[in-house]
Image (cartoon, rainbow, N blue to C red):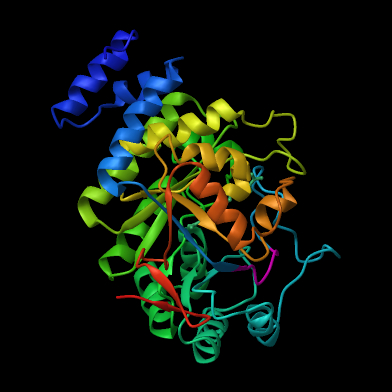
Amino acid sequence: MMFEDQRLQNIREKLDAGARLSFEDGVALYRSPDILSVGWLANRKREELHGNVTYFNVNRHINPTDVCVASCRLCAFGKKAKDPKAYTMSLEEVWEKAGHGYSEAVTEFHIVGGLHPELTLDWYCEMLRGLKQRFPQVHLKAFTMVEIGYLAQRAKLSAREVLVRLKDAGMDSLPGGGAEIFHDRVRRIICDHKITGEQWIDVARTAHQLGLHSNCTMLYGHIETEEDRVDHLMKLRALQDETHGFVTFIPLAFHPDNTPLQHIGKTTGFADIREIAVARLMLDNIPHIKAYWVMMTPKVAQIAQRFGSDDIDGTIVEERIYHDAGATTAQNLRRGELLRLIREAGREPVERDTLYRPVERVENAFTVLV
Ligand code: V47
């Protein structure tokens, strides 16, 4: 089979020869109208890496505070401390929230929040210790690189020192948020109060050097160009060559509702699917590509399982960041529904823990097989 689009045909020949895709190849993948051929290439790579398996997990999101000193235009979640609608949980409330709806099935707490001007590094360490004490078997995937950078600035410590202390207190890995688009021109407009793209990469490098795995993300569908997206993916790929610390890449579609960028339209199904496929092809060294159903809807996340994705996130309990920005998806998907979505896509569902070890149900409980 030959592709009609000559640029795609060249890319296919490069991939057949085991060569790495270039910046120009990335732009061509974004610009080709032939989404089926782009998807075919991505699916081939996905099956090479993961066969027929689609991974999912069972986690609970905990957002201890929405108070944030930054005022990122992309965000509908953060609030100023004096806003009557803002909230900050006490430590007891965090621990209580973690236990609310908790069952043996939960293998991960995903913990992120605003950049709070008063909560200290010690407070966060105590929060982690309290969670580990109460839920010793649950993996703590906590704090974006942006939160680490802010805690370091406030505590007048290096990011390394902050990471060491949080790791000692129980942090097991880091989620991928806060990366947005690394290019300065875009960052100045959508998130000018956040650490720079270079700083994000530096914090991730340090985390990986300390033996902590992390995820990585890219926020697309706002004011960025195709070149900005390829640049972002190539920066992630370069760091991964160095550290091998990234586990999963998650493309995040911008949700404009309730943000100062409301005039920007929502992403389309075509754009969401293409993002998964291009990521799979450009990020040849990052093991997993997640189609986050909360953001893309379960229907699109299902189709993504044939366009390069091997992960659909999971039965999340309570999500806030996307729902504050207008997401109308359910806040959780029952296990049975998730299994049906995966099976109807012709894939074999495998429940995983954060580091992709299979989890099996044994006598009504869930244990991790190592
Ligand atoms: O960093 C914020 C994005 C991210 C909006 O690591 C928005 O497993 C769209 O990183 N529209 C947080 N996006 C979510 C995140 C994540 C999600 C699921 C799994 C993992 C993981 C990480 O959400 C932020 C930002 O990029 N975000 N506001 C918005 N209005």
Along the viewing direction, whichever of 61 and 79 lies nearer the viewer: 61
In the rendered image, the quadrant that contains the N terminus is top left
Q: Identify the residue shown where x is 66% and y is 55%.
A: 321
Q: Identify the residue shown where x is 26% and y is 66%.
A: 209
Along the viewing direction, whichever of 22 and 146 lies nearer the viewer: 22
Location of residue 98 by image quarter: bottom right
Location of residue 24 by image quarter: top left
The residue furthest left is: 17
| 33 up-or-down from 350: above or below | above
The residue furthest bottom is: 133
Location of residue 212 by image quarter: bottom left
Lateral position of residue 364 relative to residue 17, left or right = right
Lateral position of residue 133 relative to residue 213, left or right = right
Residue 62 shown in magenta: yes
Main SS class of the magenta portion in the image? loop
Along the viewing direction, whichever of 296 and 173 lies nearer the viewer: 296
| 36 up-or-down from 251: above or below | above
Residue 63 percent location from the top left of the image: 64, 68
| 294 up-or-down from 367: above or below | above
Asked whether residue 233 appears in the rendered view, the answer is yes
Asked whether residue 285 appears in the rendered view, the answer is no
Q: Which residues are magenta?
A: 61-67
Residue 276 percent location from the top left of the image: 45, 37
Q: Give the total of numbered labels.
A: 0
Residue 149 shown in magenta: no
| 221 up-or-down from 29: above or below | below
Lateral position of residue 108 relative to residue 242, left or right = right
Residue 130 percent location from the top left of the image: 55, 89
In the rendered image, the quadrant that contains the C terminus is bottom left
